[in-house]
Image (cartoon, grey):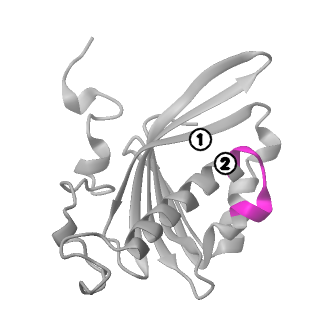
């Protein structure tokens, strides 16, 4: 086996090396932007309830994407994206896919896979990080494990990451405005 990192496909840490993801150090209460100034109902150094709620709702949007894509729920899938969403992906740091711009074009492209997929897909998103959270935007980065089940057997299809820049829209919903998906192997 050749252990030369340049010969490995994908290269170890290709997503970070190619600038697709960045992992920041842990947040501290005093380092979080977008919080209201401490007042009578908020102690200095404590995260606001709104900040915690926004963090949770932004992450849930990514989870809803994963569920709706696997369950082939076009309406919920569509609602996860802003009207001007940009989606791009890369397979192993060697094969760029996209970009796809606009909600309708993206959803058409994503759902175009459904007739060709005879298995039940599951997008397991784990190790979720939220960075750059403000009152109106957030970046959610997750690990991805993509599995498929068919004829009573489950198989691993690929692994990778999702990096989603979300925007809080006028209706208060967090939606994905920019989606970068990285896959370690083709799907």
The numbered disc on residue 112 is none
For the record, the magenta segment spans 69-77
Report the side of 116 relative to 56 (left or right): right
Task: Judge whether 37 appears above or below 97 on screen.
Answer: below
The residue that label 1 is drawn on is 123
Mark closest to the chain's N terminus, 2 or 1: 2
Residue 128: x and y in percent read 40, 49
Q: What residue is at 68 percent from the left and 36 percent from the top?
A: 121
* Residue in front for this viewpoint, 100 or 39: 39
Q: What residue is at 71 percent from the left and 67 percent from the top?
A: 78
The numbered disc on residue 67 is 2
- Furthest residue in direction top, as rendered: 1
Kindly report the distance in space between the C-alpha atoms of the residues bearing marks 2 and 1.
Answer: 7 Å
* Residue in front for this viewpoint, 101 or 1: 101
Magenta: main secondary structure equals helix
Report the side of 30 relative to 116 (left or right): left
Q: Quadrant of the N terminus?
A: top left
Verify whether residue 70 appears in magenta.
Answer: yes
Q: What residue is at 55 percent from the left and 58 percent from the top?
A: 60
Locate residue 155: give its quadrant: top right
Q: What residue is at 65 percent from the left and 66 percent from the top?
A: 106
Verify CB contact (< 8 Å) between mark 2 and mark 1: yes
Residue 85: x and y in percent read 56, 74
Q: Secondary structure at mark 2?
A: helix
Residue 168: x and y in percent read 51, 79
């Amino acid at each position: 086996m050749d252990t030369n990192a340049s010969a490995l496909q994908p290269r170890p840490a290709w997503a970070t090396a190619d600038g697709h993801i960045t992992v920041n150090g842990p947040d501290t209460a005093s380092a979080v932007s977008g919080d209201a100034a401490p007042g009578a109902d908020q102690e200095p150094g404590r995260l606001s309830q709104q900040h915690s709620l926004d963090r949770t709702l932004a992450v849930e949007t990514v989870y809803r994407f994963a569920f709706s894509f696997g369950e082939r729920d076009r309406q919920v899938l569509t609602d996860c994206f802003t009207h001007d969403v940009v989606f791009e992906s890369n397979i192993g740091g060697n094969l760029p896919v996209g970009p796809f711009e606009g909600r309708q074009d993206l959803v058409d492209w994503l759902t175009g896979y459904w007739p060709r997929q005879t298995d039940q897909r599951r997008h397991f998103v784990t190790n979720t990080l939220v960075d750059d959270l403000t009152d109106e935007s957030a970046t959610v980065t997750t690990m991805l494990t993509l599995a498929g089940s068919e004829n009573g057997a489950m198989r691993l299809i690929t692994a990778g990451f999702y990096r989603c820049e979300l925007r809080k829209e006028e209706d208060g919903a967090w939606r994905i405005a920019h989606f970068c998906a990285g896959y370690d192997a083709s799907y």
